């Protein structure tokens, strides 16, 4: 009975919410921490490698999503030949570019930090 009430409540809420709420692109979450290559175990490095790869994949999914949202928004502008239409398109283009660049920059920062720790880890193992 409680499950039916919860499902009904969710259905009612979904009916009240605008469709755009469901079209949002979830921003990827970076790995919580990158281990210190000078102290990390092989297992820690391998787990982090998986987390960094998952983050990279999530970033790609996010970029695809914001591109689709961008294209949908542009398609929704009734007349791109007017000044108002051109201004709207420029604003949408700028917003998508800013989101894209921020996500790529964050992804690259995580990858660079992890790769630096991998180099330290490998150098440490070669000294043994």
Image (cartoon, rainbow, N blue to C red):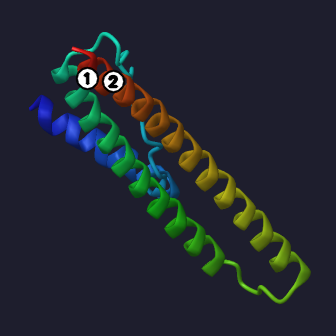
Q: Is residue 30 visible?
A: no
In this rendering, position of residue 63 left or right of residue 33: right
| 7 in relation to 1, above or below | below
State the residue position of label 1: 126
At 21% from the left and 28% from the top, the residue drawn is 47
Q: How many marks?
A: 2
In this rendering, position of residue 77 left or right of residue 41: right
- Residue 72: image quadrant is bottom right
| 71 in relation to 128, above or below | below
Q: Position of residue 73 (x, y in %)?
A: 62, 71
State the residue position of label 2: 123
Task: Return the residue found at the far top.
Answer: 39
| 38 in relation to 4, above or below | above
Q: Is residue 118 visible?
A: yes
Q: Position of residue 99 (x, y in %)?
A: 62, 51
Q: Give the secondary structure at mark 2.
A: helix
Q: Position of residue 119 (x, y in %)?
A: 38, 30
| 68 in relation to 79, above or below | above
Query: Is mark 2 in CB contact (under 8 Å) with mark 1?
Result: yes
Task: Return the residue found at the far right.
Answer: 83
CA gap between label 2 and label 1 equals: 5 Å
């Amino acid at each position: 009975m409680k499950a039916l009430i919860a499902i009904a409540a969710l259905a009612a809420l979904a009916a009240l919410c605008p469709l755009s709420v469901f079209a949002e692109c979830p921003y990827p979450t970076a790995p919580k921490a990158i281990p210190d290559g000078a102290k990390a175990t092989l297992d820690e490095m391998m787990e982090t490698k998986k987390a960094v790869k998952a983050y990279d994949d999530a970033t790609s999914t996010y970029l695809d999503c914001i591109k689709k949202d961008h294209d949908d928004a542009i398609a929704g502008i009734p007349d791109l030949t007017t000044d108002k239409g051109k201004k709207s398109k420029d604003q949408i283009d700028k917003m998508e570019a800013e989101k894209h660049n921020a996500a790529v920059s964050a992804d690259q920062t995580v990858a660079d930090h992890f790769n630096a720790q991998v180099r330290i880890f490998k150098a440490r193992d070669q000294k043994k």
